[in-house]
Image (tube, helix red, strand yellow):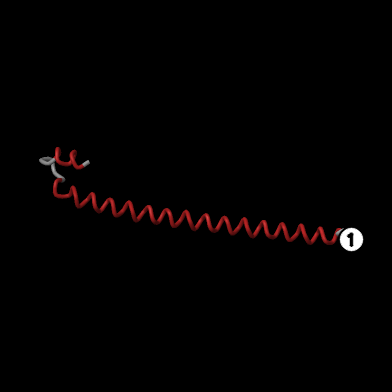
């Protein structure tokens, strides 16, 4: 038995619905992953900045200019 027009309308409607749901899901997942990666990068850069600050804050004057260059 050959599928009729009603079958194809239902089939194509369901395919379209699945494509839309899949597309929305992928978009949401990508957005969450990018947000998590950005937050992780922010925390890592902040930790590095604090570490560098502790390493150079005692040498942060004109007298220790060469020491700062060595640390950099």
Left or right placement of residue 5 versus residue 25 in this view: right
Nearest the eye: 69 or 2:
2
Nearest the eye: 53 or 8:
8
Q: Position of residue 35 (x, y in %)?
A: 45, 56
Left or right placement of residue 10 versus residue 41 in this view: right
Q: Tell me where residue 46 sits by quadrant.
A: bottom left
Q: Where's the C terminus, which quadrant?
A: top left
Q: Position of residue 21 (x, y in %)?
A: 64, 60
Helix, strand, or loop for circle 1?
loop
Task: Decide: is 52 above or below 10.
Answer: above
Left or right placement of residue 67 versus residue 12 in this view: left
- At x 13%, y 44%, the residue is 61
Task: Decide: is 69 above or below 3.
Answer: above
Q: How many marks?
A: 1
Q: Position of residue 56 (x, y in %)?
A: 18, 47
- At x 10%, y 40%, the residue is 63
Left or right placement of residue 71 versus residue 35 in this view: left
Task: Say few, some or many: other residues with alpha carbon within 10 Å of mark 1 (under 14 / 14 to 19 / 20 or more).
Answer: few
- At x 67%, y 56%, the residue is 19
Q: Tell me where residue 36 sits by quadrant.
A: bottom left
Q: Which residue is mark 1?
A: 1
Q: Position of residue 11 (x, y in %)?
A: 77, 60
Q: Where's the N terminus, which quadrant?
A: bottom right
Task: Decide: is 65 above or below 29.
Answer: above
């Amino acid at each position: 038995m050959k599928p009729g027009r009603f079958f194809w309308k239902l089939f194509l409607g369901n395919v379209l619905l699945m494509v839309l749901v899949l597309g929305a899901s992928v978009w949401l997942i990508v957005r969450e992953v990018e947000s998590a990666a950005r937050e992780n990068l922010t925390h890592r850069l902040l930790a590095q900045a604090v570490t560098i600050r502790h390493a150079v804050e005692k040498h942060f004057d004109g007298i220790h200019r060469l020491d700062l260059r060595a640390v950099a």
